[in-house]
Structures are given as C-alpha cells and as structure tokens.
Image (tube, helix red, strand yellow):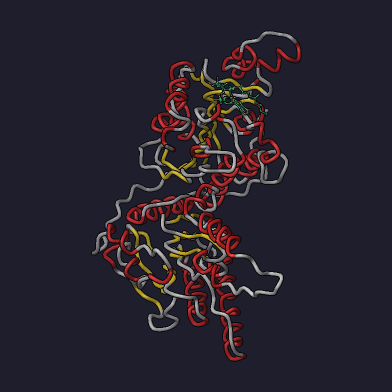
Amino acid sequence: MVSKGGGENSILRHTQRNKKLFVRERLKMLLDDESFLELSPLAGLNMPYGDVPAAGCLTGIGKICGVWCVFMANDATVKGGTIYPIGVKKQLRAQEIAMQNRLLSVYLVDSGGAFLPLQSELFPDKSDGGRVFYNEAIMSAMKIPQVAVVCGSCVAGGAYVPTMAEETVIVDKIGTLFLAGPPLVKAATGENVSPEDLGGARLHSKVSGCSDHFAPSEKEAYECVRNIISTLNYEPLPEEVMEYDDPLYSSDELLGLAPQGYEYTLPVKLIVSRLMDGSRFQEFKADYGTTLVTGFGHVEGHLVGIVASNGELSHDASLKGSHFVQLCSQRSIPILFFQNTAPHAAEPTSILQAEAHTNRLKAQASMMAAVACAAVPKITIVIGGCYGSESYVMCGRSFSPNFLFLWPNARVALVDSRHFSTIPKADDSDCKGDELELSHLKEKLEEESSAFYSSARLWDDGVILPQNTRKVVAQCLEIIKQQKYQVISPCQYPVIRM
Ligand code: COA
C-alpha cells in the first residue's frame, strides 16, 4: 500500500496527465543504486485524519556519487504532495538525522504546500512547518550542503524549501514555484496567468534567481544534482573491501527468537549470536549483573559495543551498563542497544525491598547519565518491550540515538496492557472503574502499544524484519562512519541566496 503512494489512479494522473515521474522512479535516477535505507515508510498510516501513505513524503539515506546523502522527496500522488502534520514531523526527523550524522541533503520538491484543513496542527508551533526552513539555514551554517530539485509544484511553504537550499535545480515545464498559484491570482486580481509564466523554470532561472540550474527534463535534473555533489569538495568513503564472517547461525531463526511477550523472553545471547560476525562476542563482566549483556563484536566488519536487555535491569546490571557505556565512549566505539525492557517493576513490600529499589533507581540514573553523555553514535533496536522508565536507560527515543528501529513484535508503552487488570481496584475508592471501562482502556492500550502504531507516528525510524537487522545495522554503521572523512572547519553563516 505504501509503495503505491496515493494509489493507481493518482499515479496515472501524475505520470500521464502531469508528465511527471513517480517519486520512487525519481529516486532510482538520483541514487547510485537501489540499496538505500528508507526511513519510517509506515509513517502516516491509520492517523486520526486517515491514511497518508509514507506521510506523503519519502525520506531515507542513499548514496549519490559514492557519498551517503539524506533525501526528502514529496509524493505528489498523495493529495498533491501537500504537507500533513505527520509529513512535517517526518521531514524534521530526516533533517535531524542529517545534522546528527553530518549527511548532505537532497530535497525533491513537488508539493502543494500545507494541507490546509489541518493548518493549525502544522503551522504555528516551534516544531511545525517553519522549522524545516530554519533547519535548512542552520544545516548550511553547520557546513551540511543542501541541494533541491523543483520537480513539480512548490506552492506557498513548499516554495521556501528550494529557495533556502544552497543550490537549486528546476525542471522545465514541470517545476513551478510561487507563494500563491494562478487560482489565487485570479481570485485576487482577476488576471489569468499560466503556472509557467507565474513561476516556471525559465522565469526562476533567468529573472528571479530562485533557481540556479535549468534542467530541460527530470533525467537531466538528477544528473545535474550528481554534478553538483561532485563539486562539493566532499570526500566519499574510501572504497575499502571489508572482510568478515557471517554469523554461524541463520538470521531466519530470529523470527522464532523475537519475544512475543516479556514472560517468554529467551537469553538475549541467542539473538546476539545471530547478528555478530562469526557469532563472536567478547563479553564484558559475563557473570556480574547478568540481566544486562554487554560486550564487543563486529557487524559486517564494524566494531560495536553491545548493550542488550536480558531481564529486569537490576542494580548490578545498571552499574555494569554505566561502566561499559563509558568504555565505548572512551574508545570511540558506537553502541548498539538491544532493548527488551520489563513491563513493570515489582512493588516493594518491605523496608528492605524499598531500600533495594532505591539503590536500583540510583544505579539506573547513573546509567542514564552515562548513555546520555556518551559521545559516540548509538543505534537502538527494540527487539521486544519498550516499557516505562527502563526504556530511557536503554537509549529510547528521548535519549537521541542516531537511529532507532523496531521489530514488528515490539511493544511501546508506559505499562503493558496485559497487566492492566492487575491494577488494584478498591471497591469504595474514587479510582474504581467498572469492568467495561477497564476493558476499553485495555483495548486502547493494546492498540496504542503496537509497533505499527508507534511507527505511524514516527516514534522510531521504522519497523524492520528481525532477519534484516544485521543488514540495516551495518548500513547505519557505514553511514555514521562517513563523518570521520569530512574536514570540518567552523562556519557561522549559512550560504545566503542573493
Ligand atoms: N490542502 C488540502 N488539499 C489539497 C491542497 C491543499 N493545499 N492542494 C491540493 N489538495 C488536494 C486536492 O483537493 C485533491 O484532492 P482529491 O484528490 O481528494 O480531489 C488532491 O489534493 C490533488 O489535487 P489536484 O489539484 O487534483 O492535483 P494536481 O496534480 O492537478 O495539482 C496542486 C496539485 C498542488 C498543484 C494543486 O492542487 C494546487 O495548486 N493546490 C493548491 C495549493 C495551495 O494553494 N496551497 C496553499 C498552501 S498554504
């Protein structure tokens, strides 16, 4: 459903009537190959305002001229490429990834601007539409180059994306750029003007200067982008061929190991052994704090530190985690978290237990600080539960991992719906709820905990199949590595269009 954008009729209208390429065809022309990492493809599904396939905008990371680049490409088959609130969120996340990993960015703009019925949810606030343009300036000042292609309408807000970019290409007879389109001109002044005359490729390349390159066709526009990228003075990754062993055990077995519920969780080393090169794992503190597994291994030749949940995060496990995370930070080794956090913590029943809980809390706080401040890239894979406070310690979204993916069985919530019935119900107290109310709440919680509910709202960077985890992690590690090869000198100003 997502790969078909706005549906077959809409694609036909887009390609035959409007003579434009479908967004996935555009990416094929732009990128070196098809092995790009698509981000949050399920965003926008089943939203309160309906289904918005891929949030109306494809984002991801692919190579152009050997350089990893973030792309953001409107899909005009989804309501004319208009921007929904979830589309804004998706673009902002893509920009955040570009900033955190220092990746140059390419925008393919084909958008009717704001989706007007939802304007109050995408215009006024700090993290709303305008933030995309603000980020463009900040990214340029950070020396993160940005290139835009106007390959369709760029109306209203959409017009600022290419105008704020460092270099812009516009496609003849296809690209138009204006703040108010011909219908608005007609309504305001009574003039009939064609989109081409109002803001077409010739006008913006010859008169306004909003575009820097005129492309006679879409194909030539993407070639032009490749030429621009080859002049960015940007070093591609060295072409080193890394030798590595496959894991000894098949990754297909991960399907059987993915925890369906916390109570069925198997030792996490069974999962780790199916992801590491040669199934080799240099374990750190193997016999201490065993509810967390820590150690070093390689994923397709990349050295990583592993921090994997293996039960409730105890006091000793948290101390071990803090120690290990600091080791990785000290040695500049990226950290890979496998998160499967416990749905609830047992309530203390005695003073002694309360003391143990407090000590555990302190140890978890230490680990949280270590994780938050570790100056290395972090990747989190939620392989089971992402519940409550332990999820922060295990580098959940609020701890800003560079990438966060979910397995389809993952559950994301403050509490587990299956334990909801165990909440004490005092018959005569104010907090009593009747059975029906509780069952509704349970259903709601159940629905809101699913990996798909999470991914639709961009609480993660996508749902991945367990058997693809190794490939995705290796790709992320390679992408992260690119910044090692950049020469970064301080720059305080963005490139300003004159
Ligand atoms: N808000 C909400 N819906 C919009 C929209 C907008 N800004 N712009 C277009 N749509 C909807 C259309 O109503 C149509 O919906 P439908 O398929 O349910 O009928 C769908 O998007 C496709 O639009 P359509 O005009 O049929 O497609 P097109 O390819 O011929 O043209 C645009 C696309 C974007 C060029 C054209 O629709 C347009 O100019 N829209 C107005 C843009 C605008 O003024 N934006 C101001 C934002 S502040």
Foreground pick, 203 / 166: 203
The answer to whether 411 is drawn above or below residue 495 in the figure is below
The answer to whether 261 is drawn above or below residue 163 in the figure is below
Image quarter for ligand 1 equals: top right
- Rendered location of residue 420, percent (x, y): 54, 67
Residue 333 at least partly seen? no
- Rendered location of residue 170, percent (x, y): 54, 22
**Residue 273 placement, left or right of 217:** left
The residue at the point 59 percent across, 39 percent down is: 49
The residue at the point 23 percent across, 64 percent down is: 248
Q: Quadrant of residue 363?
A: bottom right
Residue 82 at least partly seen? yes
- Rendered location of residue 15, percent (x, y): 44, 20
Q: Quadrant of residue 68?
A: top left
The answer to whether 320 is drawn above or below residue 166 in the figure is below
- Rendered location of residue 484, percent (x, y): 47, 54
Foreground pick, 286 / 418: 418
Q: Quadrant of the N terminus?
A: top left
The residue at the point 40 percent across, 29 percent down is: 25
Foreground pick, 243 / 353: 353
Q: Quadrant of the C terminus?
A: top right
